[in-house]
Image (tube, rainbow, N blue to C red):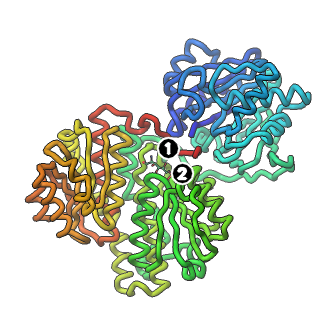
Amino acid sequence: MCGIVGYLGHREAYPIVIEGLKRLEYRGYDSAGIALFDGENLKVSKTKGKVADLEALSEKEITKSGNIGIGHTRWATHGVPNDVNSHPHVSNSGELVIIHNGIIENYESLKQELISRGYVFHSDTDTEVLVNLIEDVKKQENIKLGKAVQIALNQVIGAYAIAVFDKTKPEEIVIARLGSPLAVGIGENEFFIASDASPFLEYTKNAIYLEDEEMAIIRFHKPIKVRKIKDDSLVAPYIQELQLNLEQIEKGGYEHFMLKEIHEQPKAITDTYRGRLLRNEAIIKMAGIEDNMKKFLNANRIIIVACGTSWHAGLVAEYIFEDLARIPVEVEYASEFRYRNPVITENDILIAISQSGETADTLAAIKLAKSKGAFVFGVCNVVGSSIARETHAGAYTHAGPEIGVASTKAFTTQITVLTLIALRLSRAKGTISSSDFRTHLLELEMIPKKVEKALESDSHIKMIADIYKDAPNCLYLGRGYNFPVALEGALKLKEISYIHAEGYPAAEMKHGPIALIDENMPIIVIATKKGHYEKVVSNIQEIKSRKGKIIGIVTEGDVDVRKLADHIIEVPDTLESLSPLLTTIPLQLLSYHIAVLLGKNVDQPRNLAKSVTVE
Ligand code: M6R
């Protein structure tokens, strides 16, 4: 949560920081701020609202010149979103200025200590405590900023990515990371600092990603110095070449990132299986699995941990792994798993699923499983992310950057990777016949074309969205492989349109939710041909008798549901195990259109952030 950007070099810092903040707005967008040193003065401008509000304010308030600057876009943790709590925060002397992503857990005791020494606080934030702690250490010990940051951070409990500079020495920025990502772009006599590499892609392709418990001192005309925060030892920085390009992080003619990302799914799924699914040779090749095949074959069970949409992908995977590979699977919310003293043995495999690779709860669950000796496998989208680095092995989804806060292509590509893994393991275990295996490969290869076909229903779905956009509640039902899709459909609607929605296993409806049904309740039922079709048709009959409004997601050519439903949306036929990759498409489009028709901010829904790096 929160995006941070910094610049030190020969260019004007202002446009780099502002444009960088716009690219990081997916990380938090309840307030924004910038600090620049113009050669004489430190100028700080900050406001509740979005980066566009900051830009408008800066027009009036800030001298936009200066070669050193830091900026922040916030997702509030300590203190409500308002102007005062916005970052950057300045120390009591007015000399130090800081931006921070994360939470300082022991901020209250540190604050009391500082108050007893005469410090005054203006905001409710933990960050203001941190900057004054650094100032206090610096003054007490009469030391340089880098050393003061190091000593202060050794007193801190919590998570952080910070950038701080001293207006009396405006040729250096000190940065540090523990639990929140931080990248440094290395240009010709210039440095870019950011929560991810997107703010500096047009300036340099060379980047360093700080590891946890590392800090760096960035100085004009000097090579970057990276140190361990704990013991001060020097670390040789690893400069990597970025593969990301600008086009991937722009809207490309679509009105919203979410819509772009929905439409990117045929390509994203193809990219996910490219080089892994070799149909002519009838094999699946995945290095992370091949290298650890013994572990997978000897595993007692697989535990999947994830949050939100990634957790839903984990639920789909539970069906696939158990069905095809006959391996027992448990799927856990990472946030619950980490705090409930779970029984984990060395024969368990933990699969952590995360688009961002930065989700704090998922990271903590990984660390817990590792400490108990389990083998941990990651399924991430963001290359080089914390989870990708923290796991023993893994497989990237290769979905490309997902910027819309509501996950779309992350979900379908996660399912694709997990399907490949399940198929590979079932082949190795002999739990799938060679002809079934070939059928799966063939069908999986046809999915991108079928997703394209499903996307053709867009205008029909928009029409349905217009009819139901004012419904206060919505129910999503599915069975088997499509039960998690019902959960995902409900989550999509909730998060971007703020309509209350619930996903349920279709048969469970009669144990409670049926009481909600009346002529005003829209119920989206996934009723594709393969699976438990007849049973779901019976559930639809039950809804019909109670006058609920039925929107059926059905297989092309369906006859039975068409007779009962108020609306149907067709998807192409496929194997039951692959059907979530298709049934999820109309649900994404339905949520999207409802949210747009209601005038909601689709890409940046209220209260949310793309990457949840706090627990
Ligand atoms: O980056 P992750 O996949 O770990 O994120 C997990 C959730 O925060 C995420 O899926 C969230 O639920 C999305 N907003 C859903 O659209």
Residue depicted at x 60% and y 24%: 85
- Residue named by callout 1: 610
What is the residue that sits farthest to the right in this orientation? 142
Q: Amino acid at mark 1?
A: Lys
Left-right relation of 422 to 259? right
- Residue named by callout 2: 356
Label 2 C-beta lies within 8 Å of the nearest ligand 1 atom: yes
Q: Amino acid at mark 2?
A: Ser
The crowd level at tag 2 (other Cα within 10 Å; few <14, some 14-19, many 20+) is many
Query: Which comes sooner in the sequence, label 2 or label 1?
Result: 2
Locate residue 478, reporting x and y percent. Answer: 27, 61
- Give the SS element for disc 1: loop
Instruction: Look at the picture and state if 175 lies above or below 59.
Output: below
Q: Nearer the viewer, residue 397 or 100?
A: 100
The crowd level at tag 1 (other Cα within 10 Å; few <14, some 14-19, many 20+) is many
Left-right relation of 38 to 306? right
- Rendering quarter of residue 183: top right
Left-right relation of 591 to 555? right
Q: Is residue 381 visible?
A: no
Q: Nearer the viewer, residue 191 or 420?
A: 420
Q: Is residue 35 visible?
A: yes
Locate residue 484, reporting x and y percent. Answer: 36, 60
Q: Nearer the viewer, residue 245 or 120?
A: 120
Label 1 C-beta lies within 8 Å of the nearest ligand 1 atom: yes
Q: CA distance from mark 2 to mark 1?
A: 8 Å
- Rendering quarter of residue 453: bottom left
Say which quadrant the N terminus sits in.
Answer: top right
Mark identifier at residue 127: none
